[in-house]
Image: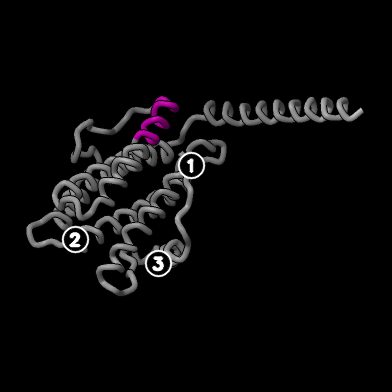
Amino acid sequence: MRKKSVILVMAVAGLLASCGADKNSNLADAGLSTPLNTAEIAGLKYMREEEELARDLYMNIFTARGSTLTVFQTISQNSEVRHAQKMLDLLNTYGETDPSTGQTNTYTDTGLQALYDQLIGTATGGATTDLDALMVGAKVEEVDITDINEKKALVQPVHALIIQTYDNLLCGSRNHLRSFVSQIEAITGTTYVVQVPALSAEVAAILASPNERCGR
């Protein structure tokens, strides 16, 4: 009798699992068959280049400043490379063109190009310090969080894949911000001051919480 019960339970579990898979498949199909609107396309393209900017900027800071700031190398190679690829994957999935120039340190978006040129100078100029570089890293993550939140708010609910990807990027940015701030506070001995004032409450909540495990 017990053996039959186990078999029955396993059969029901298998049926429920298959139903769940069909449901998720239908949701995915609905998202892919619903065209992206102008705001969604612009958001994906902008974030594609913004993730490239972080990737390039961090590696260049590490190269310029040497082994004392390995956090930049770690974040660039382990996260930002993957994040830029995730945005490209989404663009490919929805049949949109990639805005990337294909060359490091250069960006199609003129605003991002100006931001990169400003930040690389601040972080690696002759009179700059490790603290200056770390403050640039923290600022990039604050800007990234602000921009992702803005782009995510414009995504249609049916495009769950895009929302999930943005959520994963946000998780990564929160962890990166914590990493930079911990080193900043170790150097200054004082509490970190947010650099994007509109993000003050969110940054305070992030810094008061531990590192997270982010989806890939």
Percent x, y for residue 162? 48, 38
Kind of residue sitting beneath label 2: Asp
Instruction: State which mark lies toward you, 1 or 3.
Output: 1
Residue for point 46% across, 44% down: 168
In the picture, the quarter occupied by the C terminus is top left
Which image quadrant is residue 127 in?
Answer: bottom left
Residue wearing tag 3: 200
Kind of residue sitting beneath label 3: Ser
Toward the right, the furthest residue is: 1
Residue wearing tag 2: 130
Kind of residue sitting beneath label 1: Gly
In depth, the one of 190 and 91 nearer the eye is 190
In the picture, the quarter occupied by the N terminus is top right
In depth, the one of 181 and 21 nearer the eye is 181
Query: Does the magenta run of residues contain 109?
Result: no
Q: What element carries label 3?
A: helix
Which image quadrant is residue 76 in?
Answer: top left
Percent x, y for residue 107? 22, 39
The image shows residue 15, relative to residue 165, as above or below, that is: above
Q: What element carries label 1?
A: loop
Instruction: State which mark lies toward you, 3 or 2.
Output: 2
Q: Earlier in the sequence, mark 3 or mark 2?
A: 2
Q: Do the residues labelled 2 and 1 touch (CB within 8 Å)?
A: no
Q: What stretch is highlighted in magenta?
A: 85-95
Residue wearing tag 1: 215
Toward the front, the furthest residue is: 2
Viewer can see residue 203: yes
